[in-house]
Image (cartoon, helix red, strand yellow):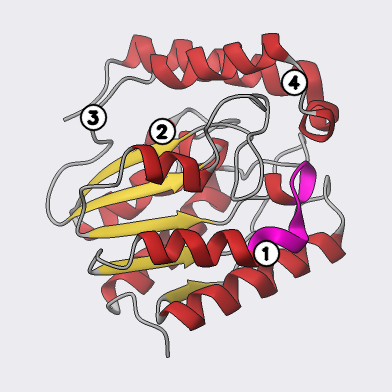
Amino acid sequence: MTRPRLWIAAGITLLVIVAAAVGTAVWRDGEDAAACWAVVDAEKALGPGPVTSGSPTITALGDSYSLGVGVAGPEEAWPAVLGRRLGAEVVVDGVGATGLTTRGFCPESPVSYGERVDADPPDAEVVVVQGSVNDALGGLPDEVAGAAGDLLADLEDVPTVVVVGVPVIPAAEMGDLRAIDDALRAAAEDAGRAYVPLLDEGIEILPDRVHPTVPGQQRIGELVAAAVEAGGTSG
């Protein structure tokens, strides 16, 4: 099943306009209501349904990376790469500027990763939790470990869970990115889940200093696919 291309184009255009207009400042102050609604409307415009078809069913929990912001849209984002590699059905639960400790552009709405899982637990055999650079740009890096631990506890009944780390991006402080990487790794290990680090993978980033290029998205998808193929367990 695929989404209508017109809707995809409309949604991605809105997301790109928001990102270009507000930059990282809105991530940091988190008070732009107009940006919030633009992001929410764009995410809704992508429409329901999987980005790829097949088996097993995989839910990709993420942010604008999972929506393909900065590239051509969901078809070039890492979840679609993952689905094509595995011949799986991948459903994207992505909201731009969110993370484990941030609601991004929507500070009054329950759209952090944990809040979304609480409201609508994923019905999938595999869940991929994409660590978010937004936790470095506008969240609380020191609280990522606790939030990740709580989220993984909520996913304890899912057969396979893979946690993905954050890449190096010019817009964030390296110390914050390393703190998030350490926190996600520890939470995954404590839960007995696989961890996919990205800090040393040379993920290529766009001139916007935040989002992956097409090769960057491709590399993330390939690394996640390898972890899912290995069973999604630590060690």
Residue occupied by mark 3: 49
- Distance between mark 4 and mark 1 Cα atoms: 24 Å
Q: Earlier in the sequence, mark 3 or mark 1?
A: 3
Looking at marks 4 and 1 on the same chain, the residue that comes earlier in the sequence is marked by 4
**Of 221 and 14, the residue lying toward us:** 14
Lateral position of residue 185 relative to residue 233, left or right: right
Q: Secondary structure at mark 1?
A: loop
Task: Find residue 166 and name its label.
Answer: none
Position above or below: 60 against 176: above
Q: Is residue 139 magenta-colored? A: yes
What numbered label is drawn on residue 74? 2
Q: Secondary structure at mark 2?
A: helix
Q: Nearer the viewer, residue 44 or 75?
A: 44
Q: Is residue 200 visible from the viewing direction of this image?
A: no
Helix, strand or loop: magenta stretch: helix
Of the two numbered discs 2 and 3 in the rendering, the one whose residue sits closer to the viewer: 3
Amino acid bearing label 1: Gly
Look at 46% across and 58% down and name the residue there.
151
Residue 26 can be seen, yes or no: yes
Residue extent of the magenta highlight? 136-144
Identify the mark at residue 20; answer none if there is no mark.
4
Q: CA distance from mark 3 to mark 4?
A: 27 Å
In the picture of the structure, the residue carrying the numbered disc 1 is: 202
**Residue kind at label 4, given as amino acid type:** Ala
Q: CA distance from mark 2 to mark 3?
A: 12 Å
Tags 2 and 1 touching, CB below 8 Å: no
